[in-house]
């Protein structure tokens, strides 16, 4: 994944599923489509599975960024690879064999990613950071959309950036939860370069303008980082 620009990933969790095709068309100026899978066990909510993912894939040309918030990622990863995921994030907290799972995802031609809950320290990535294409830092406790950004997430992203430099690797750093124009600059300046946005993209009437606003703020953070 390219790290030279800020990528915007609208989360379809906030979309109107009665007109999903139109909703996806409205965010065609984005870079990825973020797809949250919740199992009602790892997180206290249920969302959707592979059948909807196949419909999303048929309705958009954007890469599909699948976030598995599930207790059994080893079982479910093959399902979502077969359904067309381009990136798969599984939670480090739920994975028994994280390195093996990353290899499985990569061997299937997708990008491998690990996700961290807000209370999970970055240091736990030390043994897997060289095997991933992306790290997803949750900036809210996963399970529900529309939550408020956890402020100390900015410092957590800085620590993750430092860990990557120590290992000589540069995976994409994705943030998810309460991301909007008010914090996009700071979180990108800290080291993030993929912004997942649900309510801040799908709530406004003009989705293209919302995406452009997020990207502009993110690029300001990118310039400040340089």
Image: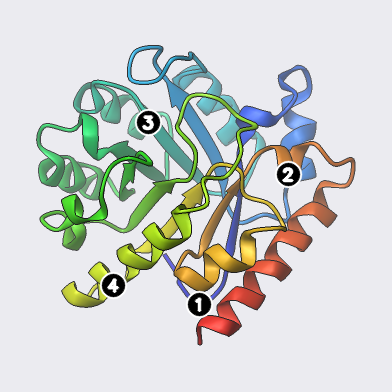
Along the line of sight, the residue nearer the viewer: 121 or 199 = 121
As helix, strand or loop, the secondary structure at mark 1 comes to loop
As helix, strand or loop, the secondary structure at mark 3 comes to strand
| Residue at 37% across, 31% down | 68
| Residue at 47% across, 70% down | 190
Q: Is residue 151 above or below residue 178?
A: below
Q: Is residue 107 above or below residue 182?
A: above
Residue at label 2? 200
Q: Position of residue 11 (x, y in %)?
A: 60, 38
Numbered badge on residue 68: 3
| Residue at 74% across, 44% down | 201
Quarter of the image holding residue 1?
A: bottom left
Residue at label 1? 4
Q: Is residue 24 above or below residue 190?
A: above
Q: Position of residue 26 (x, y in %)?
A: 79, 43
For discs 4 and 2, the disc positioned in front in the rendered view? 4
């Amino acid at each position: 994944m390219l790290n030279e620009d800020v990528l915007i990933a609208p989360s379809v969790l906030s979309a109107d599923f009665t007109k999903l095709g139109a909703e996806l068309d409205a965010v065609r100026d984005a870079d990825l489509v973020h797809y949250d899978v919740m199992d009602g066990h790892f997180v206290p909510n249920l969302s959707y599975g592979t059948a909807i993912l196949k419909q999303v894939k048929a309705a958009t040309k954007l890469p599909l960024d699948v976030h598995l918030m599930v207790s059994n990622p080893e079982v479910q990863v093959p399902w979502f690879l077969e359904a067309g995921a381009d990136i798969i994030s599984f939670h480090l907290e739920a994975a028994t064999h994280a390195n093996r799972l990353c290899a499985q995802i990569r061997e299937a031609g997708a990008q491998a990613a690990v996700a961290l809950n807000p209370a999970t320290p970055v240091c736990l990535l030390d043994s897997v950071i060289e095997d991933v294409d992306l790290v997803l830092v949750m900036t809210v406790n996963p399970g529900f959309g529309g939550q408020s950004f956890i402020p100390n997430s900015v410092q957590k992203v800085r620590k993750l950036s430092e860990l990557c430099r120590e290992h000589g690797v540069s995976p994409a750093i994705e943030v998810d939860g309460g991301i909007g124009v008010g914090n996009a600059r700071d979180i990108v300046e800290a080291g993030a370069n993929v912004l997942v946005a649900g309510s801040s993209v799908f709530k406004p009437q003009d989705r293209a303008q919302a995406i452009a606003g997020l990207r502009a703020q993110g690029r300001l953070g990118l310039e400040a980082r340089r």
